[in-house]
Amino acid sequence: MFPYPSGNIHMGHVRNYVIGDIFARYQKLKGFEIIHPMGWDAFGLPAENAAIEYKTHPQDWTLKNIELMKKQLSTLDLNLDWDRELATCDKSYYQFQQEIFIDFYNKGLAYKKNSLVNWDPVDQTVLANEQVIDGKGWRTGAVVEQKELSQWFFKISHYADELGESLDDLDKWPEKVKVMQKNWIGKSEGCEIVFKLEKNDDEINIFTTRPDTIFGATFIALSINHEILRKFIDVNKIDSIKAEFDKCDDKEKIGYELPIKSINPVTGEIIPVFIANFVLDTYGQGAIFGCPAHDERDYDFAVKYKLPIKKVLDCSDADLPYTEDGIMINSKFLDGLKKDQAIEAIVNYLEKEKLGNKKVNYKLRDWGVSRQRYWGCPIPVIYYEDGSFRVLDKEELPVELPYDIKMDGKGNPLLKENNWRSVICSKTGKKALRETDTFDTFVDSSWYFIRFLDNKNSKEPFDREIVNKLMPVDKYIGGIEHAILHLLYARFFTKALRDIYKLKVSEPFKELFTQGMITHKTYKNEVGSWVLPIDVAIKNNELVQISTNQKIIEGPSEKMSKSKKNVVDPEEIIKNYGVSATRAFMISDSPPDRDLEWTDAGIQSSKNLTNRIERIFFKRYQYKKPNRR
């Protein structure tokens, strides 16, 4: 995987690229032609933040970092194809990304809509669902808010079934990565049932994998973002309910009863409708019916809010909730049936009465690719004064970013660049404004591996014959943390490009190798501040901070990170131990797919090994008398 040009390589980079270099050299020695390229994932918000902090320009900061990191990588003796180098911030790259967007749009794979989005209040930008981890932004750690915005989306859901099914063909991928992707795609087969409201014509569609339990349904629960809410309660009330939900423990079931009732479509009973904190937007349409007798979550909720609990499975004297399979009871025409028989019978009934139908549901949602920032690939769209828009033609590309721009850290800088925004449409002659959102940087990294194969092509993103000959990538190396972000998006892009450009390849990476992390012990001083390992020494059998002579508290080994200061400088390591010892240590001690703990003793052992090999080599070849035959 190509790196983000942050300014300095770290030991994680070193391990990744040394492992790749070993694979490449080995295959080359076996007689294969090898493509071992390097490039730069160069757009992104960190460059904007750095530009503000250091009073520079994101482009200048990025290009300077690229040159620095190239110099650092050169010290590792990597056998890289620098003639294939690319940077996603170069217009020779992002022009063709804009072309791909146009092709996606023309094929119905890109569209715009108003949507509740994940808003990072620190970075002031939208996050895709995959970029929200435990309710927090993947980069800043800030609590994510819900905000309604008009956004561009890629229709990844169009490929949901294929993305899930074709995982079985990836026999050289780690099983844990495939499981993570399969769970994220979240395919489930069931039934969508229509629940009408009691006193108006509105309906709530509910997807369930257990339609057989509908006779035991005693309430409906909606997610806080369900579209029907705003018809019955105002936005301020919704916000206050959400704030209450955010405060509570994840395990606690909290609900708010709405001023509406629904009708159970098979029993005709009137049942209450709640907003509940355990209903996910990403499941079905953000609505469930509760059958408390046979679901633990529904049972807890019903007990708390004193809702009826009706048994529809024969569980004799077993305690409720009874969640095992059983024979249907109290369910009219389903009585006496087993689970599978009951599901088939109720689905047939619902379809016959036009109250529901079979449906396959996916947790996977379309990919929101709009980001409210400057340093990203411009989206090639203009907007007219009447609110309509036009996706540009390929002949009008590239849309370049303005260089002279004011960076103050408040919102999207492009909104203030009127000279750049204001244009006259070349087709209609009308006044228009450019799109100020830029692409999510995961778009940039979703096809770079294909561009590597034809990076000098100035006419099109890539030559089909070259791609058909050389793809897929034989071995792709990177961390498992990319399982449901980059790797899923790259698979989607490859399938979409296959269909648009008539490619023969359906998967981007034949083999995926997920290298382990490099860990290091952590250190804190007496006031709780993190301390660099280089500033720690043993004195009188105690750890002390060299610079202050304070006592040091040793913590567990954790992934190297700047925030915890448990890092070592690759340049210093190479300077002190040599590149051969550094490379050797990256693959020593543990299999490369497992974590490697950094120790001074370990790198010294590698140094001793390489010294011994050198002595043997020079003794054998440098001083041996020549053969006189």
Image (spheres, rainbow, N blue to C red):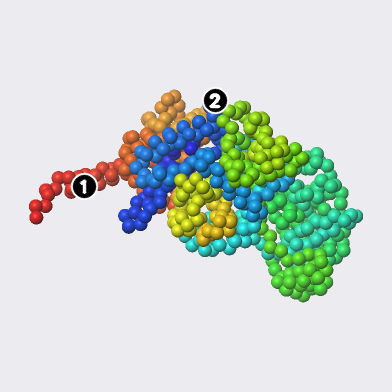
- For this rendering, which residue is in front, 381 or 123? 381
The number of callouts visible is: 2
Task: Identify which residue is drawn at 84% across, 47% down.
Answer: 231
Which amino acid type is shown beneath numbered disc 2?
Lys
Where is residue 351? Give x, y as percent: 79, 68
* Residue 181 is at least partly visible in this image: no
Q: Secondary structure at mark 2?
A: loop
Where is residue 434? Give x, y as percent: 66, 37
- As drawn, the label of residue 415 is none
Task: Identify which residue is drawn at 68% across, 36% down.
Answer: 424
* Residue 157 is at least partly visible in this image: yes
Q: Secondary structure at mark 1?
A: helix
Contact? badges 1 and 2 (CB < 8 Å): no
- For this rendering, which residue is in front, 164 or 493? 493
Residue at the limit of the structure toward the left, as seen here: 628
Tag nearer the camera, 1 or 2: 2
Image quadrant holding the C terminus, namely bottom left
Where is residue 374? Give x, y as percent: 60, 35
Q: Report how far apart the C-alphas of labels 1 and 2 lie in the structure.
A: 53 Å
Q: Is residue 491 above or below residue 328?
A: above
Residue identifier under label 2:
55
Residue identifier under label 1:
616
Structural crowding at the residue carrying mark 1, measured as other residues with C-alpha within 10 Å and reported as few (<14), some (14–19) or many (≥20): few
Left or right for 159, reference 283:
left
Say whether disc 1 or disc 2 marks the residue closer to the N-terminus: 2
Residue at the limit of the structure toward the right, as seen here: 199
Task: Identify which residue is drawn at 85% across, 58% down.
Answer: 196
Task: Identify which residue is drawn at 62% across, 61% down.
Answer: 161
Structural crowding at the residue carrying mark 2, measured as other residues with C-alpha within 10 Å and reported as few (<14), some (14–19) or many (≥20): few
Residue at the limit of the structure toward the bottom, as seen here: 336
Which amino acid type is shown beneath numbered disc 1?
Ile
